[in-house]
Amino acid sequence: MMGTNRADVVIVGGGFMGAAAAFFLRRRGVSVILVERGLVGQQASGVNFGNVRRQGRYLEQLPLANRSREIWGRLKELIGDDAEFLLSGHMRVGYRQEHVERMEKYARDSQPYGLGLQMLSARALRERFPFLGPEVIAGSYAPHDGHANPRLAAPAFGRAAVRAGAQVFENTEIVDIGKDGDDFVVSAADGKTFRAPAVLVTAGAWANRISARFGEPVPMKAKGPQMAVTEPVPYAIPPALGVASADPEEGIYFRQVARGNIVIGGGCGREEVDLEQRRAFVNPRNTLLQFTQLPRVVPLLRNLSIIRVWSGIEGYVEDDRPIMGPSARVPGLYYAFGFSGEGFQLGPGVGDVMAELIHTGATTTPIQQYHIGRFATPVASAA
Amino acid sequence: MGQPRVIVIGAGPAGVRCAQTLVEAGLRPIVVDENRRDGGQIYRRQPDTFTRPYAKLYGTEAERAQALHASFDVLRARVDYMPETLAWNISEGNLHVTNNGRTRALPYDALVICSGATDRLMPVKGWHYAGTYSLGASQIALKAQACSIGRQVVFMGTGPLLYLVASQYVKAGANVAAVLDTSPLMRRVAALPKLLARPAVLRNGLALVSYLKRAGVQVLTGVTPVEITGSPENGVQGVVVRDRRGNERSFECDAVGMGYHLRPETQLADLARCAFRFDHETRQWLPEVGEDGRTSVPGVYLAGDGMKVLGADAAEIGGRLAALAVLKDFRFRVADEELRRLREEQAKMDSFRRGLAQAFPWPVEQAAALPDDAIVCRCEAITAGELRRTVCEMGAREANRAKALCRVGMGRCQGRYCGHAGAEVIAHAAGVPVEQVGRLRGQAPVKPLAIATYGEVE
């Protein structure tokens, strides 16, 4: 039998949320063990598009997104790594009047949250971004949003957490979480056990299995984003771009990284994936759909080639909102998962908020709308 | 149920013999090939307007080349031949192919992947300068375009191809400054018993070496590559090695052909979701194959160097075997006698293969000794030093993790050329066996795919 490791908090799942929470808990002097089945930041956190975008989020999420955005701006100083965060703006563009109205409405509604959105006419757009295609008739520019490299962000938080004193166990699969008095006992497949009076579940698409164990199942699905990347070309498209269409096939988005490659997502639905095999694939149909949509925004992109596609496994909650906050049933148990394809920008903020919640019992940022109790059924029973 | 729909990928020795065997059984397979003409790499056919005779183009292999081409000429009307067509993805029983700006999904019941091999490359400082080619590319230049890769050429690396290409260059009248083999002579002597499994091939190999020496080409064995000298403006200007006594030797040249034997092209097998295993003998991951080229995925078969590097003759046998496996699995009658004979022949090839692996080893130690400023991944310009820092400071001890953190193997070749060496650098820096480093996951497209590619969606 291996030894038992004890801490104030055990975090189950080393994605962006878990790694950031570990880091911010340590900054509050709380002792932390982070347990990850594979490597930190390997699943949804590492394969997503990399948007550091607030524009377009549900209004009720903007306080959290704002808190996160403030941390994004201080990453280098906080964790010693900027995760290639480019404060290069984010722009939504529209092809039709309905898109323009949608963008205008969002710009008005989001005004209290200080995103600084600028509506740009077709002429203003073309002066500023001459590469846009003739179909684009308006844009909503968010100057303080940007994009970053998802392959780097969560691992960088993980390393910073270790430097700050967190114990991180990678390649450690959890097989059981039980209670022993006031303590949670978290058992791993390799015989290690971890004890703590508090557990934070940040296990992404797999977290539902744990919450269900505690009688709190969440209606969610695992889906894979459909991504592609081009060969590198000279850096010319600073803002991350996306189409403000409700039609998923029109809703292509892309960003050019400083190295020159253009990362592409959307323009198609997301594929359902198998949680067991832990590998998600891109449906070639989706790649071809992206090929038809991309040149509508920037016609010149037709001249490039893609060099790689990839997918990953993300957890989508039925109502499109994450699960955040304390358990409705078990004291000391906390959740942060199910970010439904929108978690990357929120990562640092979620870590900070969850650390605050666990440490102080309350948060200064409203998250009660994400409480798991919203899915409680009268006859809920432990699985 | 009608006839099974069979697709053969590749029209080299394995693909042609596979298609032929299927046709003989009454099937009409689709043959998809990236090249403009059949023959694969080794028996690559020259453009229509070129007139070099077989003996000049293929040397000792002229007869075999001619026989393969003749077989395919007969087959052409009896298969659906798709030349200049890239198989770029596989999904749910469909092979996705692109040709001339269009892409199509071809449904299949059986897929035989005969994707061949490319050079296995070990980086050396300066190998990113213009004028550095693989041995395979050097050979393509000669066979397909009747061109030399430079005015004065050095060939460096190890393996049978090193001597074959060098002698082909000499025969064609090119100026070969030196042939520099990293394998020490003793290794070859020790491998003789296994190599004797194919005495004629061994004899041909030895004849190449003496031909080169007679032609006045310096042939050094047991060398350690130090550097390809040059500059971004002028490209390659020379090669520096240490000879087996440890003395530094320089050779002036404007082009280098490099290669350390071959590695199978396994991306399609990967996209077909075939299981892989680590082969300790050659220190690389290979698709798991059962009898006669069956993979872990029902309906997907492998043959030729794309499965395991056994050479052209074995590829012809492997192609036939895979076809027979397909036929058997679809309940066609297959002559057991034929099957037994082919398997026996193939066993001899395997003994010879192991002899080659022993005689011309993958120079692992060079990965460890690579200076920090040498580039490992040429697509992304990642140096050995950056890769080592990723391992030591960021904790990346696995190939895909290192790729995620520092871009090694992330570029347009997807690690096909640097993946093996990158894994060795990681293994050495992390102090773990190379099999623990794993292998880079293959992703579509197999080669870059133009966004302008048009395809009917559904």
Image (cartoon, rainbow, N blue to C red):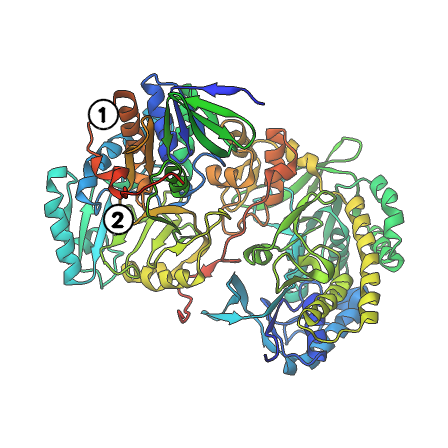
Q: Give the vertical position of B278 relative to B161 (above or below).
A: above
Circle 1 is placed at which residue position? A362
Q: Classify 10 Å Cα crowding around label 2: few (below 14), some (14-19), many (20 and above).
A: few
Q: Which residue is painted at 68% across and 61% down in the image?
A: B294
Residue A319: assigned label = 2
Picture coordinates of residue A281, whole percent (x, y): 46, 54
Provide the secondary structure element on which disc 1 rests. loop
Q: Is residue B384 in sight in this rendering? A: yes
Q: Give the vertical position of B298 relative to B181 (above or below).
A: below
Provide the secondary structure element on which disc 2 rests. loop
Would residue B265 be found to the left or right of residue A367 on screen? right
Question: Which amino acid type corresponds to the residue marked 2 in the rendered image?
Answer: Asp
Residue A1: assigned label = none
Q: Nearer the viewer, residue B261 or B404?
A: B404
Picture coordinates of residue B122, whole percent (x, y): 65, 42
Query: Furthest residue to the front?
Result: A379
Residue B344: quarter of image: bottom right
**Which label's residue is closer to the chain start, 2 or 1?**
2
Q: Which residue is painted at 75% across and 58% down in the image?
A: B311
Residue B161: quarter of image: bottom right
Kindly report the distance in space between the C-alpha atoms of the residues bearing marks 2 and 1.
24 Å
Q: Give the vertical position of B337 relative to B257 (above or below).
A: below
Q: Which residue is painted at 42% across and 47% down in the image?
A: A313
Question: Which amino acid type corresponds to the residue marked 1 in the rendered image?
Answer: Ala
Asked if disc 2 and disc 1 are in contact, CB closer than 8 Å, the reply is no
Would residue A175 be found to the left or right of residue A342 on screen? right
Would residue B306 be found to the left or right of residue A95 on screen? right
Q: Nearer the viewer, residue B252 or A330?
A: A330
Q: Are marks 2 and 1 on the same chain?
A: yes
